Amino acid sequence: MENQTRYTVAVVGATGAVGQQMISLLEERNFPVGKLKLLASARSAGKTVRFKGEDVTIEEAKPESFAGVDFALFSAGGAVSKELAPHAVRHGAVVIDNTSAFRMDPEVPLVVPEVNMDAARQHKGIIANPNCSTIQMVCALKPLYDRYGIERIIVSTYQAVSGAGASAINELLAQTRDILDGKEPQANILPVAKLPVHYPIAFNAIPQIDVFTENGFTFEEMKMVNETKKILGDPEVKVAATCVRLPIVQGHSESVYVELKQDYDLQEVRALLEQAPGVVVVDSPAEQRYPLARDCAGKLDVFVGRIRRDLTHPRGLHMWVVSDNLLKGAAWNTVQIAEELIKDRQ
């Protein structure tokens, strides 16, 4: 990205896990940052973050913070996005929002660059980043959708605690130490901090992410349902999800079952996935090779393995999809959208 225009970039939620990853990616990717503004809550104001060899002071995020900003990357919670994103747009910034605040707004494109980057180019100031679990799934399904069509998706997720924030990571580590020391673990965060009942995540699996809706599915599950339809531009595709939290720090895994509209050749499916942008196939049962959350942490791609025919449905297909929820599931998808928009300006 040499010899380019330099941009003023604001990161909102700069002290959070995703915000920190955004800052790292802006440096690692040599994003053409002329000025970096780091914004967070008042309690974080005054702290400094190292960026390209210099200390950048964190400021309190306010409506006037966005004067002169070209790109505002938000990851500070939905309430902050709803309050401040319109101010950023008013100041002329392109907002790329990592919360659920605008995802289902019909005026706001919901974008995964490998899947529907064209939608981002129709933005009216705000572009929404999908849910982490949705992002990795649609990356794996897009080449199959284009080739065969998709009738039905059933997905079960195995999600890392980092999706619930730094406090959930700390609680997992503390609970693990307590159990190994023979102590009773204390649970205050999961499955949902604001709800009255909490369960230990250490040595456990919790089949609840976010609060339940009236239909018995959680909001996390319904995000996958609704976001998948919007991203693919297909309200008819059938989607059902079960989302589970596991005692893993980083990296979401998914068991994805899909019923295609046309007959398929398994070797062609494998070839389509191998050629798909941002997808890496790791699939050799004879060598026990398949994607692992541990191996995928810190990497930008979506990893797919365990690709196999269903035994009962002639067009049924199973796969195992793994990605770093803080990177492709959040920070990288955000920065990637900004990179693609900059390419359009060259």
Image: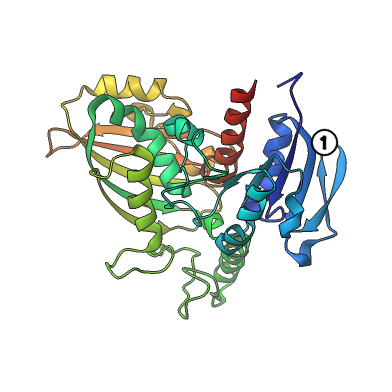
Q: Which residue is mark 1?
A: 52
Residue 238 in sight here: yes
> Which quarter shows the C terminus?
top right
On the image, which quarter does residue 228 sit in?
top left
Q: Position of residue 301 (x, y in %)?
A: 51, 33
**What is the crowding at mark 1: few (fewer than 14 residues within 10 Å), some, or many (at least 20)?**
few
Q: Locate residue 283: give its quadrant.
A: top left
SS state under label 1: loop
- What type is the residue that disc 1 sits on? Lys
Residue at the image point whose x is 75% and y is 19% from the top: 2
Above or below 119: residue 226: below
Position of 204 relative to 73 (above/below): below
Q: In the rendered image, is residue 243 in sight?
A: no
78 relative to 193, above or below: above
Picture coordinates of residue 12 (x, y %)?
A: 68, 53
Q: Along the horizontal axis of the image, is 215 left or right of 245?
A: left
Residue that sits furthest to the bottom in the current view: 196
Q: Residue at x 49, y 56 (%)?
A: 100
- Residue 93, placed above or below residue 40: above
Q: Residue 118, how many percent across, how many down? A: 46, 30
